Image: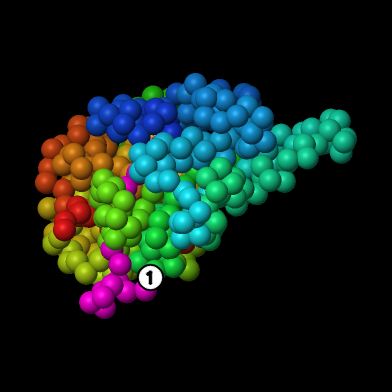
Amino acid sequence: MENGDGSRRRVVVTGVGMITPLAHNAPDTWAAILRGQSGFGPITLVDNPHHTIGGLCEVKGFEPGDYMDRKDARRRDRYQQLATAAAAEAMRHANLPITDDNRERVGITIGTGIGGLRTVVEQEAIVHDGGLRRLSPFGITMIMPNGAAGMLAIDYGIHGPSTTVATACAAGNDAVGHAYRAIRYGELDAVLTGGTECIMTSVAIGGFERAGAVSTRSTDTPRPFDANRDGLVIGEGAGMLVVESLEHARARGATILAEIAGYGQTTDAHHITAPPDSGSGATRAMCKALADAGLRPEDVDYVSAHGTATPLNDTAETAAVKAALGEHAYNVAMSSTKSMTGHIMGATGAIETVFCALAIRDQIVPPTIHYATPDPTCDLDYVPNEARPRRVRVCLNNAFGFGGHNAVLVIREFEE
């Protein structure tokens, strides 16, 4: 569907919600980000003395019963509970009513890397110790990666398409990108979108340890783009957005936070976990996103980096940004909020999309904390340790995942 002048529909953000290792809502999480607060802490969700990591970025003090009926909470895996909490905030913020008049024109698109992994592990232990009759009758729906989307559809009575994207750590960005396309091309008027993840199990933590991808420090970690970075820190959480066509938002008098203006998606086809040294797939995704938005490299003010603090990722991403933006890369602020939230896997792109929208609203860019020692292979402006007031009109949000998935969003200041 196009506008009367033949142009495609514009897509705007009207609501955001988050639950993260820093706080249980978007305003408090954003305030913590701007303070440079770390969400890193001791391991409480997994009881295994053999892990080599120094800690995790867990959501602290989360009580599912504060966000949903306690019976419903028992029937939802933690990744679904986190999605429920973040979605409730986003829907309140957007003040989007779901009625018989619009429910078929509203959709859901959620990103997650794995789904209900904690339930898989718990139910396997139960059946091993007590037999099949001890299994939960809700175990399958708690495990399903699409369970969060299906449950949110029921919660809000949303009848439009409901989709789950599982492109590893690119999934949050891909979910928002698919929502953007569904609205831009006229399939839907509004979408509840975002990402959610909780992989806090010994099998997941141990898998990352065996892959050599996680930091073993117990303080001042992770360290994106720092010469002494030694790996990512696993996090959990959810980030949700309500996105709408501009016409739909205007018609109901919604407050517009920012505009989703472009989306680029590529695959490396190089290695199942490592990017090419040149970051060529990431470069192509950034260039495609800018082209989709009708923007030039010189228009970019801020890059929300994937910035995992693994030696390979940060060097390759730096090379990719320089290839995509040319000399302008040295004029752009670029930071990794994973230095504070940890790496929230399939949710991370959506959470960082929210951060981009808030950076535009408040005209400030978040810092990369724990940055102490420059790396010659990472020579851009990573906004070290302190947030920086800055004119922010256009953001690039990078998300890259195992499997070679690259997803980049352009979030820009809304202008009439």
Indicate whether 180 appears above or below 355: below
- Among all residues in the image, which is located at the extreme front? 101
At which x and y percent is residue 222?
38, 35
Which of these two is toward me, 259 or 46?
259
Taking the image as drawn, is residue 322 in sight?
yes
Q: Circle 1 sits on which residue?
A: 185
Q: Quadrant of residue 124?
A: top right
Indicate whether 47 appears above or below 335: above
Which of these two is toward me, 20 or 88?
88
**Magenta-colored span:** 1-18
Task: Name the residue rendered at 24%, 31% in the picture.
Answer: 34
Indicate whether 144 appears above or below 387: below
Task: Name the residue rendered at 51%, 54% in the picture.
Answer: 100
Taking the image as drawn, is residue 352 in sight?
no
Q: On the picture, is 251 further left or further right than 208?
A: left
Which of these two is toward me, 98 or 31?
98
The number of callouts visible is 1
Q: Quadrant of residue 292?
A: bottom left
Give the residue type at disc 1. Answer: Tyr
Task: Name the residue rendered at 47%, 28% in the picture.
Answer: 59
